[in-house]
Image (cartoon, rainbow, N blue to C red):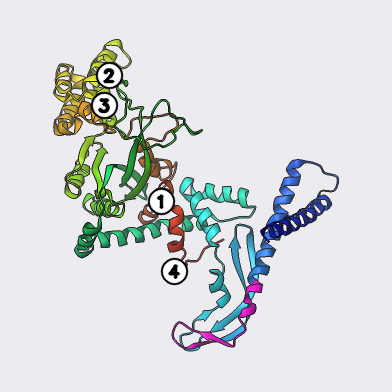
Amino acid sequence: MEFNTKRMQAVRLKQIAELLAEEIKERMGGEQSIDEMEREMRELVKQAASLGIQKIIEQGEEVYAARGVPCSCGETAEFVSRRKAVVWSVFGKVGYRRRYYHCCHCHCGQSPLDQKFGIVPGQATRTLGSLLGALGVEVSFEEASELAERFLLFRVSDNTVRKHTEGYGQTQTQIEKEWKRTAEDEKALELREQSLEKRPGRIYASMDGVHVPLHGEWRELKTLCWYEVEAIHPSRPQNHHGSAVPNHHPERAQSVGERVGEQSRLQAKNMKYYCDIQEAEQFGKLLWASGIQHQVDANEEIVFVSDGAAWIWNLAQKYFPNAVQIVDWYHASEYLTPIAEAAFGANTAPAHEWLTQARTELWEGRIQDVIQSCRSLLSHTAARPWIEKAITYYDHNEKRMDYARFRQCGYLIGSGTKVVPFLRTIESACKQIAAVRLKRSGARWTLPGVIATAKARAAWLSHTWDSLKPDYFNLSPATYNL
């Protein structure tokens, strides 16, 4: 039976292909250009698909012939007429007719056919809405509109792209609110603790803050990334993206003798991003709630790798007091370069020599030696402000900079440390939310708009985009200007 079904499908597809080919020949006449052939075929397929969707929708109404249907108010909505409606799909505008009912008690109208297919008349289908939102998290809404027209062969306004993008972000906001509510429920936490199964291994977290442009001001977008780290072995095959094929070896298996500043045997995976514009105290609730959601406390160790911002370590200590705290080596080393340049001059041999020595001391976790190296240059007046800033930074974070021990234990010590070619680092990936999408030339955001777009982009980078679709399209529909 299965063979016969597949054979019949193949025959039908061949018939459709022959019909399309004949139509294209008539449209093109003597023209033999493959480009023109492709354009005509795309347009013809789009038209045929739109008509096909219309036919399927209208055929679906054959079961609805009642004079009245139940209304949500408890009364009965009466049949009025068969009315026209439009829905926008990835194949363009689809017009159709369906039975329309009206309730004289609550004055609400409805169409059982729209409810059956999940259609909101005048708006985009779920597939189109998801596609537009995905474009909107990658490029500006104007560019997304232009790209959509090239891909889909019909015009979609930038306002429609914006609303779908922000819609996904608003859905993420609602999900996070529920997480926070659950994470603050003491009874729920007690029950969770009783059933929580501990597991070996480490879970990492990195936090950062990036300023984004609003109308008339700049605000800090705080970002959070939960992730895991795995070891890469020289003998292991790599895929075409340059990242190693996963295995189950522990991350401790990194080799000795790696160059200063490079942990080329470690890479991050399973990254989940969260962000918001709010004070640190409020952002801490998202840190805690997302951690509970991902069951990070079930891991043998929690490791925070971030820069030296006080708000980051205050939150880490408050919510995960037993976590390992590591100041990002990449950020820590950045304090040394302006000292060398101010004291000796940029790109000079003495600057390079001093910087190499100081970076090596830092890499080995000899923080007091680093501080002493900085103090030795206090006679250079131009370097004094940079030196004082660096000494304060290193002094406050000395315990978080025991890099030799951290590396010996197999910890990733730098969210900005480049690991393998083509691999997006944690630090740059966090900033992709802001720098790549929100800080584009000329961008000026409203506060709700920038938060929603940032959260939508975070979901896209976290590969949780599709999981938002059911919740997003069950929200109260807005009016989209297609």
In the depicted view, which residue is nearer to us: 370 or 143? 370
Dot 4 amino acid type: Ser
Point out the image quarter for the N terminus.
Answer: bottom right
Q: Is residue 429 left or right of residue 111?
A: left
Q: Residue furthest top?
A: 349
Dot 2 amino acid type: Glu
**Tag 3 and tag 4, C-beta contact below 8 Å:** no
Residue 76 falls inside the magenta stretch: yes
The span from disc 1 to disc 3 (Cα, nearest Å) is 31 Å
Residue at image position (29%, 33%) is: 412
Q: Is residue 126 above or below residue 203?
A: below
Sequence-first disc among 1 and 3: 3
Choose top left, top right, bottom left or bottom right for residue 427.
top left
Sequence-first disc among 3 and 2: 3
Callout 4: helix, strand or loop?
loop
Q: Position of residue 3 (x, y in %)?
A: 69, 57
* Residue pointed to by mark 3: 333
Point out the image quarter for the C terminus.
Answer: bottom right
**Tag 1 and tag 3, C-beta contact below 8 Å:** no
Sequence-first disc among 4 and 1: 1
Dot 3 amino acid type: Ser
* Residue pointed to by mark 2: 341
Label placed on residue 476: 4
Label placed on residue 459: 1
Callout 3: helix, strand or loop?
helix
Q: Residues within 10 Å of mark 4 (few under 14, many from 20)?
A: few
The span from disc 1 to disc 2 (Cα, nearest Å) is 41 Å
Q: Position of residue 337 (x, y in %)?
A: 27, 22
The span from disc 4 to disc 1 (Cα, nearest Å) is 21 Å
Residue at image position (47%, 64%) is: 473
Segment tinted magenta in the rendering:
58-77
